[in-house]
Amino acid sequence: MLWLTGMLMSTIASDYFPKTAQEQVLCFLLALCASAVCGYLTATLATFFVSQDAESDRAEIAATQSIQAVETEITALPRFKPA
């Protein structure tokens, strides 16, 4: 039951259901690897699109240039020296 629940939660269930414990463990590990690869590809695409949007001047999120301008202004501020 644990194997079946894990397979259904990983959403990579198929019509083939392994019978032995070794087959079940191997199938579950392969499903976890497939889920990890899918998540990695999704994160890669998300990073690409977010970085592309951040470099745009018309982006809704703060552009990279404006962040660098704020950093420049902050470093130009005089340092507070306690007496």
Image: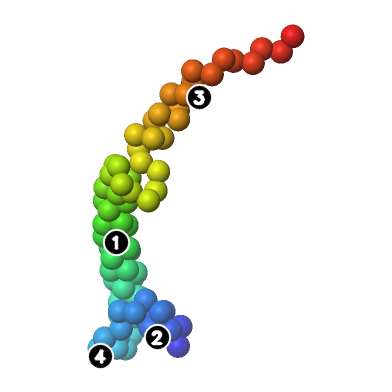
Q: Which mark is residue 4?
A: 2
Horizontal and vertical percent for residue 74?
50, 24
- Using the image, determine if residue 48 lies above or below residue 27: above
Q: Amino acid under label 4?
A: Asp
Classify the position of the C terminus by image quarter.
Answer: top right
* Label 1 – label 3 distance at C-alpha: 35 Å
In terms of sequence position, does the residue under pointer 4 or pointer 3 come before the other? 4
Residue holding disc 1: 42
Residue at position x 29%, y 61% in the image: 42
Amino acid bearing label 1: Thr
Which numbered disc flags the more N-terminal residue, 2 or 4?
A: 2
| Side of 3 relative to 79 (left or right) | left
User: Are there few (<14), some (14-19), or many (20+) residues within 10 Å of tag 1?
Assistant: few
Q: Secondary structure at mark 1?
A: helix
Q: Within 10 Å of the Cα at label 2, are there few (<14), some (14-19), or many (20+) other Cα atoms? A: some
**Mark 4 against mark 1, which lies toward the viewer?**
1
Q: Pick whichever, 30 or 39, lies toward us.
A: 39
Front disc: 1 or 2: 1
Q: Quadrant of residue 36?
A: bottom left
Residue under the point 45% across and 88% down:
1
Residue at numbered disc 3: 74
Would you name the residue on which mark 4 appears?
Answer: 15
Count the numbered circles shown.
4
The mark closer to the camera, 1 or 3, is 3
* Marks 2/4: CA–CA distance: 12 Å
Badge 4: residue crowd in 10 Å (few <14, some 14–19, many ≥20): few
